[in-house]
Image (cartoon, rainbow, N blue to C red):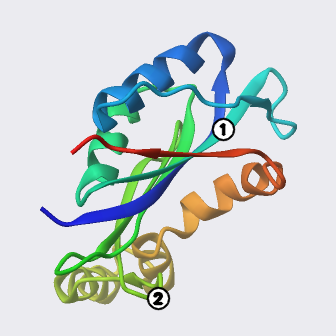
Amino acid sequence: MATTRGVLYVHTVPSALCPHVEWAAGGVLGVPVKLDWTPQPAAQGTYRAELSWQAEAGTAAKLASALRGWQKLRFEVTEEPSNGVEGERYSFTPTLGIFHATTGVHGDIMVPEERLKAAMLKAASGEADLTEEVERLLGRPWDDELEPFRYAGDGAPVRWLHQVV
């Protein structure tokens, strides 16, 4: 199985959920996780943390699945491309839910042809605006919602963990 690296960015979480996030991440990575939680200035009463990891390809999906149902949590998970496997990006907000994109070697989001065709068809039939559909395919609504929390994390500590393989 190919190994890769990635980062879990927890942008906002109430203090009561911090140990549950650590437990969920540790369950996916197969090692105990203890994060350095810092206050999130963009959302009073919440905390943030980052976890850099190295594990088998597909770990980002497992982390996103383990965390996605918690409504008071905002997070992103990225996974670098590895030998024969594209990269991935997941974003979650309580209002928008989960976003997933495949990423190429340079970090660009790669939109499958069929999804673009479906967006064009919706626009041609008057169901949707093409620009809005493409922005949604690229994750723009998630980026817009998460951006204030990303900047608030500048200078925060990062911890590296390696999955036991």
Q: CA distance from mark 1 to mark 2?
A: 25 Å
Residue at the farthest left position: 1
Left/right of residue 135 with respect to residue 56 in the rendered view: right
In the image, 32: left or right of 158?
A: left
Circle 2 residues within 10 Å: few <14, some 14–19, many ≥20: few
Q: Which residue is mark 2?
A: 106
Say if 163 sits above or below 139 in the image. Answer: above
Identify which amino acid the numbered label 1 is placed on: Ala
Q: Nearer the viewer, residue 93 or 4?
A: 4
Q: Is residue 10 left or right of residue 131?
A: right
Q: Amino acid at mark 2?
A: His
Indicate which disc, 1 or 2, sits on the residue closer to the N terminus: 1
Residue indicated by mark 1:
49
Which corner quadrant of the image does residue 127 belong to?
Answer: bottom left
Question: In the rendering, at what x and y percent does residue 57 appear?
Answer: 23, 60
Q: Position of residue 11 (x, y in %)?
A: 65, 42
| Element carrying mark 1 | strand
Question: Crowding near pointer 1: few (<14 within 10 Å), some, many (20+)?
Answer: many
- What count of labels does the image hold? 2
**Farthest residue toward the top?**
16
- Considering the image in quadrants, where does the C terminus appear? top left
26 or 120, which is in the foreground? 26
| 85 lies above or below 58 | below
- Secondary structure type for disc 2: loop
